Amino acid sequence: MRELSIFVDESGSDGLSDRYYLLTVVMHDQSDSIAESIKAYEDALRAKGLPNIPFHASPLMNGKDLYSGLDLRTRKMLLGSFRVFFRHMPVRYHTFAYATKKFDSLDKLAGTMRRDIVNFLFDNLAELQAYDAVKVYYDNGQHSIAESLHLAIEYALSKDAVVYRSAQPSEYRLSQAADYICTMELTAIKYADHTTTATDEKFFGKWSDFKKGILKETRKKLV
């Protein structure tokens, strides 16, 4: 039986208070095992003396939560290790990005997002329907996005082919990959709009370095 996993992550608040809203979907054919990649990643962390912390880009970059107490050098090494791990992951992704100032309400943003997700699914319908099961992993952290995601997928695909499961980033490396991608795509927008922070530049350097390096690598998996 062919199974496709879709992991979802978002960047932005549910009240449109952030400048941008991003939704990333990461697709993984479950016949392509990532067990060896995970083992190599975790072995590399041990070899470097780095803590095996579930990857979460924003706390990592800002030294918050599980990353509090870790110096900048260590956090850069953790990001670099996950970057190598992601480079070898057999996944593809698509990111939907929105400037929140273009929307008068959250409902209008959710409606646009639902339409865009449906269009994306229909563009890839033949491939998606070739799977016996499509499993969607999402933490349901923001109600409006969860509802848009459910409605779009149920509209485009047969309901009995879809299984919704909660995804906590600490439990799934693929969910962490979605968080990683969301951060890179948001950072690209910030560079383009000249709204990068000092923290962004500490981790990624100049726009040309970011564009030719980590962003180019990431977008090799873009659908």
Image (spheres, rainbow, N blue to C red):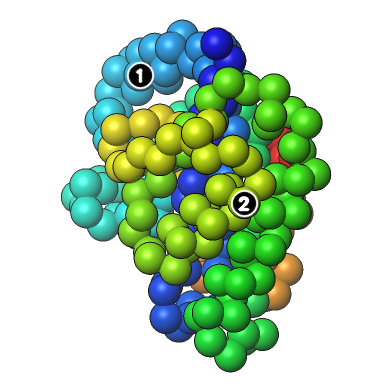
Nearest the viewer among 211 and 12 is 12
Nearest the viewer among 16 and 45 is 16
Q: Which amino acid does label 1 sit on?
A: Glu
Nearest the viewer among 205 and 119 is 119
Q: Name the residue under label 2.
A: 155
Q: Residue 35 placed where, x, y %?
A: 43, 12
Q: Residue 162 placed where, x, y %?
A: 50, 36
Q: Residue 176 bears which disc, if any?
A: none
In the rendered image, is residue 52 in sight? yes
Q: Residue 159 placed where, x, y %?
A: 52, 40
Q: Is residue 23 above or below residue 178?
A: below
- Residue at point 62% right, 51% down? 155
Count of picture labels? 2
Q: Is residue 84 above or below residue 113?
A: above
Q: In this view, does 72 lie to the left or right of 16?
A: left
Q: Name the residue under label 1.
A: 42
Mark 1, secondary structure of its residue = helix
Residue 3 quadrant: top right
Quadrant where the C terminus sits is top right
- Residue at point 48% right, 57% down? 10
Residue count near mark 1 (Cα–Cα under 10 Å), binned few <14, some 14–19, many ≥20: some
Nearest the viewer among 72 and 37 is 37
